Amino acid sequence: MLEILVSIATLALFFYAIKLAFKITWGVAKIIAVILFTLALPLLVVLLFVAGGAILFLPLGLIIAAIVLLIKAV
């Protein structure tokens, strides 16, 4: 009888430890996610502006090249 009670207590402690490990892991994952979003979001905004600017540079460069060619031709 004592062996059954000790086994039940051991299993209860084991499942409690598993539950605690999942809670700790979830908390650490949330902290890491917050840090990554804090760093990544401003970087994403800056890179979107840079990429958007790079897309605009080609037509702007072509217009400037056409103006330069027209000025030299005249």
Image: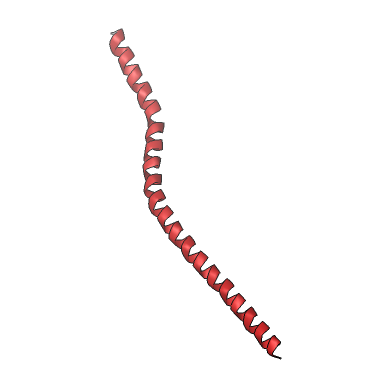
In x, y percent, where is residue 73? 31, 8
Residue 30 shown left or right of residue 70 in the figure = right
Q: Quadrant of the C terminus?
A: top left
Relative height, residue 23 to residue 6 (above, below)? above
Relative height, residue 7 to residue 32 (above, below)? below
In x, y percent, where is residue 39? 39, 50
Image quadrant of residue 17?
bottom right
Relative height, residue 22 to residue 59 (above, below)? below
| Residue at the outermost front position | 2
Residue at horizontal 37%, vertical 37%?
Answer: 50
Residue at horizontal 36%, vertical 48%?
Answer: 42
Q: Nearer the viewer, residue 68 or 45?
A: 45
Residue at horizontal 41%, vertical 32%?
Answer: 55
| Residue at the outermost top position | 73
Image quadrant of residue 18?
bottom right
Residue 9 shown left or right of residue 59 in the figure = right
In x, y percent, where is residue 69? 33, 13
Residue at horizontal 37%, vertical 29%?
Answer: 57
How is colour applied across the structure in the image?
secondary structure
